[in-house]
Image (spheres, rainbow, N blue to C red):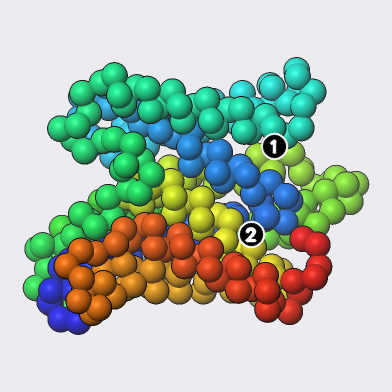
């Protein structure tokens, strides 16, 4: 793993690792609150926001697309709540209606607009463009100590690092209320915890992770990392602190194993084509969850 890996493989691994950990952190509390489907919904509804941002600006620019995706996520949360209250239907059903409708609207916008020249299509929405996030300006491992070379890293790397540390800081600061509303929201309210506000901020954090990771890794990894590492960790331990720590380790491990398997295993076996990194990372996450469901210490407990 010399200069070639640093140039072509290091940044995709790091970006997907930070994306996975950023999604897994809020995912722990969403799983405990039985709101894991929110991660699926958010990862789908950002597509029309990204397409609209491109149509308005005429270019693939990071911040306009992030603002468009964030706007679509906020709109979807409002619509879900409106449908739930006005229609008096179950929360999961309301989410299912909104995220399928929004994603379908995004696909229609893609089909009716000229986005092929900027590689903005359904495939990129699902799988991202992880393999293209390379660092050609690097010159081996020594570039990690060169400020000039570091400045040439893909912008998705800096975005995911910032998102991860913001989410980590929020989790650390609001740890106690997050734990309270995840295990016993009624008790949290009786002792004065702003459960509604904390719950809304938790959804915002999940949306932030999904929006930051969307164009780099696609919705497949976002969904997998919000659900699989936290659920896997939940089947392995009863302690919430251990669960959160394990979820980060599992997200990191799934990223490394999935990327190496997708990029190098076919070549080692004599095949000329590689596999989708995003698809393999999501597959490894699912296999880890399946393994813990069969052999986990707490698999018989209803979560």
Task: Answer yes or no: is residue 147 visible.
Answer: no
Frontmost residue, 153 versus 93:
93
- For residue 47, above or below residue 226: above
Q: Which residue is mark 2?
A: 28
Report how many numbered discs are placed on residues in the image. Answer: 2
- Spatial CA distance of label 1 from label 2 is 18 Å
* Camera-side mark, 1 or 2: 1
Give the SS element for disc 1: helix
Q: Residue at x 20, y 64 (%)?
A: 273
Specify few, some or many for label 2: CA neighbours under 10 Å numbering under 14, 14-19, or 20 or more: many
Q: Are marks 1 and 2 in contact (CB under 8 Å)?
A: no
Mark positioned earlier in the residue sequence (1 or 2): 2
Q: Residue at x 15, y 81 (%)?
A: 2
Image coords of residue 20 (percent x, y): 46, 60
Left or right? Give the position of 199 relative to 183.
left
Image coords of residue 293 (percent x, y): 67, 70
Image coords of residue 165 (percent x, y): 46, 59
Q: Residue at x 74, y 39 (%)?
A: 196
Q: Which residue is mark 1?
A: 92
Query: Mark on residue 235?
Result: none
Left or right? Give the position of 191 relative to 291.
right
Specify few, some or many for label 1: CA neighbours under 10 Å numbering under 14, 14-19, or 20 or more: some
Work out which quarter of the rendered image holds the C terminus and state it.
bottom right
């Amino acid at each position: 793993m010399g200069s070639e890996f640093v140039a072509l493989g290091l940044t995709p691994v790091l970006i997907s690792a930070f994306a996975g950990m950023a999604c897994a952190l809020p995912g722990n509390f969403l799983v405990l609150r039985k709101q894991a489907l929110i991660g699926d919904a958010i990862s789908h509804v950002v597509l029309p926001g990204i397409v609209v941002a491109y149509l308005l600006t005429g270019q693939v620019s990071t911040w306009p697309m992030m603002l468009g995706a964030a706007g679509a996520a906020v709109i979807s949360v409002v619509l879900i709540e409106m449908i739930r209250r006005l229609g008096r239907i179950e929360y999961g059903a309301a989410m299912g209606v909104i995220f399928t409708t929004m994603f379908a609207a995004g696909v229609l916008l893609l089909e009716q607009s000229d986005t092929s020249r900027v590689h903005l299509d359904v495939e990129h929405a699902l799988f991202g463009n992880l393999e293209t996030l390379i660092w050609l300006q690097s010159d081996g491992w020594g570039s990690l100590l060169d400020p000039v070379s570091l400045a040439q890293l893909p912008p998705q790397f800096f975005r995911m690092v910032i998102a991860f540390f913001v989410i980590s800081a929020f989790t650390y600061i609001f740890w106690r209320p997050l734990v309270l509303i995840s295990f016993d929201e009624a008790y949290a309210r009786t002792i004065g915890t702003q459960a509604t506000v904390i719950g809304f901020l938790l959804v915002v954090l999940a949306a932030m992770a999904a929006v930051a990771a969307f164009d780099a890794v696609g919705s497949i990894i976002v969904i997998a990392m919000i659900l699989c590492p936290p659920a896997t960790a939940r089947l392995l331990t009863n302690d919430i602190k251990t669960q959160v720590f394990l979820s980060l380790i599992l997200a990191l491990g799934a990223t490394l194993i999935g990327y190496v398997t997708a990029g190098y295993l076919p070549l080692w076996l004599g095949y000329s084509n590689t596999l989708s990194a995003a698809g393999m990372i999501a597959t490894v996450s699912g296999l880890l969850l399946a393994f813990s469901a069969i052999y986990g210490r707490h698999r018989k407990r209803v979560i």
